[in-house]
Amino acid sequence: MRRLIAVATAGLLVLGPAVGASEAQDDLLAGVNRHRIALDRRPVRADPGMMRRSQRHAEQMAEAGDLFHSQLRLPEGATWAGETIGTGGSIRSVVRAWLHSPEHRWIVLHRAQIGGAGVARGGGRLWLVVQIAEFSQLSVRRGLPLPLSSRGRSAPSAQPPAASRPAPL
């Protein structure tokens, strides 16, 4: 069984070699949500299936020592899903880098309702994954429950045509 070894130092999370990660995953999703809320977006709710897949993918990238996208799957009932990946010295530095990249920022701030996060250590740095999914507004307005596990078909392109993107912040 993996254990998470974490030490908070001046607001920076330093993870030991056994990033098994539920705390680190929560920290990553909380970091993304802080930015979403600050920019008038709703926070994404952690989805167990997306959390598992995001963590597995972060571990695969750390083991390979390379960044690559997963075979992202749409949760049942979702109309869109996106994924951001990154590597760096801290969760905070990677989230900041995503927010300074127009393509990554668009995904992180998309009007999604659920998400997953993965954090792994390899090669002296962190490997991060955030996956988020959106459900139709009709489903949300009707109060239909959002799924608690993600399964389903392949996700459409994470980058829609420019005309359908939200206005820059």
Image: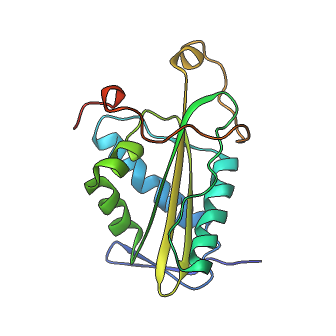
Q: Quadrant of residue 19?
A: bottom right
In-image side of 12 versus 137 (left or right): left
> Extreme right residue here?
1
Residue beneath the point at 67% across and 25% down: 145
Q: Is residue 117 left or right of residue 168?
A: right
Residue at image position (55%, 21%) is 136
The image shows residue 166 at horizontal and vertical percentages of 31, 30
Q: How is the image coloured?
A: rainbow
The picture places residue 74, in percent across and down from the top left corner, at: 64, 38
- Looking at the image, is 51 positioned above or below residue 15? above
User: From the image, which quarter does the N terminus lie in?
Assistant: bottom right
In which quadrant is the C terminus drawn?
Answer: top left
The residue that appears at 69% across and 33% down in the rendered structure is 147
Viewer-proximal residue among 40 and 70: 70
Q: Position of residue 59 (x, y in %)?
A: 62, 72
Front position in the image: 108 or 42: 108
User: As displayed, is residue 148 above or below residue 77?
Assistant: below
- How many dots with numbers? 0
Residue 152, image x, y percentages? 73, 37
Q: Is residue 76 above or below residue 52?
A: above
For this view, does 18 lie left or right of residue 99? right
Q: Quadrant of residue 149?
A: top right
Residue in view at x 51 percent, y 54 percent: 130
**Position above or below: 161 against 125:** above
Please identify the quarter of the rendering in which residue 64 is found. bottom right
